[in-house]
Amino acid sequence: MGLTSLRRILKVLAVIFGEDEGLYICIPSSTVHKVFEKLSFEGWDKNLIDLVNEGVLRVQRFGRGSRLCIRKDDELVKIRDFIFSPESFSSISLEEFERIFDDALTKLKSSSVTGFVDLGKVRDFLMRNYGIPEDMFVKYVSKLITSKRWKYAICHGGSLRLKVGGVQIGLVKLVRR
Amino acid sequence: MRHLIASSRRAGQIAGRRWIEARDLAVKYVRQGRPLVAIVGRAGCGKTHIMLSMYEELKDYVRSFIDTTTLENRTLSTIAGAVASTQLIINLIKYAKCSRSEDYCKRLREVYSSGVHNLIEYARRWPTDFLRDLTRLSQSRGYKGLIIFIDEGAISSDDPQIPQYIRTLHAFRNICSQIDGLHVVFSILPDVLEYIAKVDVPLMDIIRTGVVYLPDYVERDEIQELAKIYPSREDCLTKLLDNYEMLPPLTVRQVLCLLQECDNPTICGIEESLEVRVEEQQ
């Protein structure tokens, strides 16, 4: 299998199984292994090393295992937006967004150790479940953080960074309803 | 405005029931023998202050308080070297009279006899041996053990020194399991803890056994308590209480700042109007 085909398959896997991490989308290594074993592609592991050397891919330690992170490019972003961004989204109101944003913070809180939720994870969650595209997400979150700032404790970190009043933030916790 | 930075001079002053409870819980964890105790909270919520207060409280232990921002790096060797240069530790070794059977005491005395620099060098080269001997010496002199307080180990999850610091915490996790009576208390930001949970599960499993979360923000009644013991203006206190519901969740540092600078909240990190934009993450 050539490098171009491998790259394309990885992009598809990134869209389906990946987690957004800023400039990269990361897929658990075990998932990549399973898929390529099933598809019986020979020599894919050697080609992966070539992609790592090219800087397209990087291997990251993650929990008890590892994951492969593929650098985002226009093609990857287009595929993702095509699948997860239905045209009808623009009808959502700020109040409706606030409700689903707060619910997402409550749901995702359990998967964090500090109670602070990564804005990148909230974006992915809302994209998957409600089809909210990234630019809309940023626009509404910005409105919420500025107009209802008494509700949210904010903190540095995370995979999606917003600059709020000169301070970079990426972790949010809902503290008051 | 110097009181906005935690210092040992005010370590005895803690306001707010939730902060006192957090301090007491952390002290309890040490006394229960938990090896690593993590004080978690966002910037300005009182982590250093709580650790200084613990330092005062745990006088039955030999203690060393390390501000890692003053160190060249975050390795185990460098931190052990910093422990060796603490006055309390130097005095303990300097005045130790070793009996024949106390090999650990004799080793430390011998190294110290060539000067403090030699002791620091020894600690840097053989950190585990040094910490083991020092803990045993502490215990043999009537102390319950040795506590190393590490402040500001990683200033954010983007700190380039973070992989090194995590390796050091992991090393402490392993060393503490071999040395009874050795404890490490460290302050940590939420994003750094989230990062550890992602990249080092075995370390996180141990941190979880001794983690203390500080409150994310100050409640209205706690503002009044803070105003009683810290410098504050009467008009600022009134203004702060009147506008409490409109303000973002305030950290202790922000409240202390606003109690004096309510006319200029921007310097306390409270923006009058906020501008939000996306930042590219590398």
Image (spheres, coloured by chain):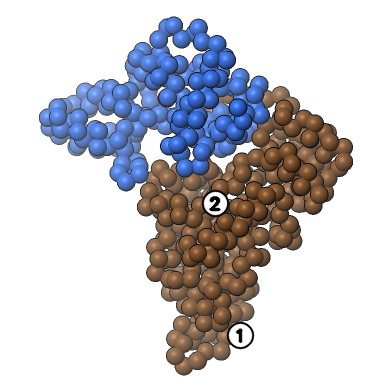
Amino acid at dot 1:
Tyr
Work out whether residue B279 can be spotted: yes
Up/down of B254 relative to B230, above or below: above
Amino acid at dot 2:
Val
| Residue at image mark 1 | B95
Secondary structure under badge 2? strand
The image's mark for residue B212 is 2
The quarter in which the C terminus of chain A is drawn is top right
The Cα–Cα distance between marks 2 and 1, rounded to whole angstroms, is 36 Å
Q: On the picture, is B202 further left or further right than B258?
A: left
The quarter in which the N terminus of chain A is drawn is top left
Please provide percent x and percent y for residue A92: 51, 10
Q: Residue at x 73, y 44 (%)?
A: B222
What colour do you see for chain B?
Answer: brown
Q: Chain of mark 2?
A: B
Q: On the picture, is A2 further left or further right than A115?
A: left
Q: Residue at x 69, y 39 (%)?
A: B219
Please provide percent x and percent y for residue A20: 40, 29
Mark 2 closeness class: few <14, some 14–19, many ≥20 residues within 10 Å: many
| Chain letter corresponding to the colour blue | A
Please provide percent x and percent y for residue A32: 24, 33
Q: Quadrant of residue B88?
A: bottom right
Secondary structure under badge 1? loop
